[in-house]
Amino acid sequence: MEGRGFCFIDPHGDSAEELLGMIPQSRMDDVIYFNPSDTENPLGFNIFEIESPEDMDFVISETNSMLKSLFDPGNTGVVGPRMENIVRNAALLLMSDPDGGTFMDIPKVLVDPEFAKQKIKYLRNQRAIDFWTKEWPASQRSNDAGELVSWVVSKWAPFESGLINNIIGQKKSAFNIREVMDNNKILLVNLSKGKLGEAAAKLLGMVFVMKFQAAAMSRADIPEDERKDFCLFVDEFQNFATDSFESILSEARKYRLNLILANQFTTQLKDSIKDAIFGNVPNKIVGRVGIDDAEILQKAFTPTFTAEDLTKTPNYNSITTVLVNGFPSAPFTMKLLPPIGRSNSEIREGLRKYSASKYGRPRAIVEDEIRKRLSVNSTPKPAQRPAVSPTVPQVAQKPQISWQERAINATEPASVNSSGKPQDSFLDDWIKKRDELRNKTVSAEENSAPKSNLARTFQKNILQTQQQNSSGLQNKNNPQIQQQIRSPQMQYNSVIQDITSSKEEKVESNRLSIREEPSQDKTGSIKKIGNDEVIFKIR
């Protein structure tokens, strides 16, 4: 790889896991492992996080394209002009706030007038101001107001689980895609549909593609010869292609974003995407395909190869044409290389934990921040409530209030303890468990003392990291949050035991010797020493 960066978006997850265990020692500190199934340390990824106000229109357009791809792929009108207009103005309202907003805040904006009112003052778009001060309030007086809002808000239901909400509901992303490209990072994206659900996995994949497109185009601010090559590998890319995907194929090359796209059947692609591929993708590698696909693909390889040749290609072989010195080569057959190296489970587990500690945040802190941000009371205070004339029956306002309250109650998390126990009982139980945990920790440290200092140092580093992450949290004394902050330390126990239980400093050639060394600065890192030894520099 010559130290170059790349991103691999895997909709199944298995290949991303294998690659994680094959990272060279010299590149370990460059790895970002995006794994939504790690619910304890979610990595923030905010769709509405922008670099400048000029990015708003692009993000809004892509957001509507993503919703259409998810809920109206056949263009039947489910996601039409009316919904697109609502989403556009809601997104403008959220992104105009200096404190920022997220994709998951849109339902709150629509059902909570007080929440929206706090943000209107930041709008600079007169069309959006008119929408929120005139058009939207007027629409809520109609008989079908509740149905309209419920219909729009229902599209967010697949993303309301903690698994996905704790990722796209964070205002601050864990990493910046432009920095990933410019600094040669290795970003592995595990979008296992079996764990996330199809809609959530598809949304995240489309967001990644959108972010890479925006980051690539932002490279216009640096000379072309200073733009570093970056490869984006996307498996089953048809799942993540929006209407703007053609522009990526035609424009990404000039910004040194190299796309490697994999797909099984041409019937999975829209005609516009197929046309863009045949018109803008010079390098084509085709394995054995069915007769229908062969009839379409043979155009790229005729007259050297026919459709019949494409249906009889042997296993691990392909028919290929590539660009050589700016000109397409004659089609030829190519034998594919077997996988290079083997995936090391110890490296895989260590990097998974290391990346979660470096880029993730404790779940309790994330959920507490989201809850506080969305907990604005929409009911006006008594002093602010206008006087009601005796001639106007109050019952006339009940339909509007009832659907708003129902929607708010449905979207906000319950504040009642799910166990139903009194607070004092929970606190007593937590203190008892804390004391037991401390006793076990002291005993474990005494037993592991003769083995290595890595366990204690690694645990200390994780605890310090989590304490820094929680420094801005106001409710520090909440026992549920404190328990969550400690959880990453416990998560490392298994990998620490695996490392420290070995009595040998050196291990087999396909394994690594791992030792600790204090860092000279305030940042953690991973460094290479020799051929088979890795140092975790711990702060």
Image (tube, rainbow, N blue to C red):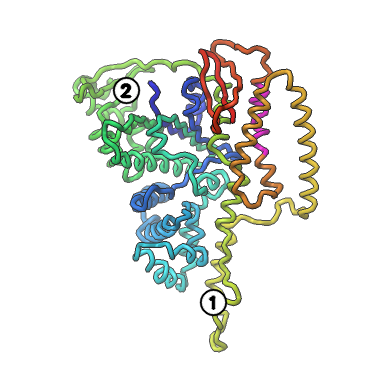
Q: Which quadrant of the figure contains the C terminus?
A: top right
Magenta segment's dominant SS is: helix
Q: Looking at the picture, which amino acid does disc 1 mark? A: Gln
Mark 2 Cα shell of 10 Å, populated few (<14), some (14-19), many (≥20) = some
**Which label sits on residue 73?**
none
Residue at screen point 67% across, 38% down: 486
Q: Which residue is mark 1?
A: 397
Depicted 325 relative to depicted 73: above or below: above
- In the rendered image, the residue lying farthest to the front is 520
Image position of 462 (left or right of 116): right
Q: Secondary structure at mark 2?
A: helix
Q: Which residue is mark 2?
A: 311
Residue at screen point 76% across, 54% down: 423
Q: Position of residue 385 (x, y in %)?
A: 56, 77
Q: Nearer the viewer, residue 400 or 488?
A: 488
Q: What's the distance in space between the residues labelled 2 and 1, CA to CA?
A: 68 Å
- Nearer the N terminus, badge 2 or badge 1? 2
Mark nearer the viewer, 2 or 1: 1
Q: Looking at the picture, which amino acid does disc 2 mark? A: Thr
Residue at screen point 73% across, 18% down: 450
Image position of 417 (left or right of 260): right
Please give the range of residues in magenta: 486-498
Depicted 28 relative to depicted 165: above or below: above
The answer, for residue 239, to whether it is visible in the render is: no
The answer, for residue 268, to whether it is visible in the render is: yes
Q: Secondary structure at mark 1?
A: helix
Instruction: Using the rendered view, name the quadrant where residue 206 is placed.
Output: top left
Dots 2, 1 in contact, CB < 8 A: no
Q: Which quadrant of the figure contains the N terminus?
A: top left
Q: Position of residue 500 (x, y in %)?
A: 67, 20
Mark 1 Cα shell of 10 Å, populated few (<14), some (14-19), many (≥20) = few
Instruction: Using the rendered view, name the quadrant where residue 462 is placed.
Output: top right
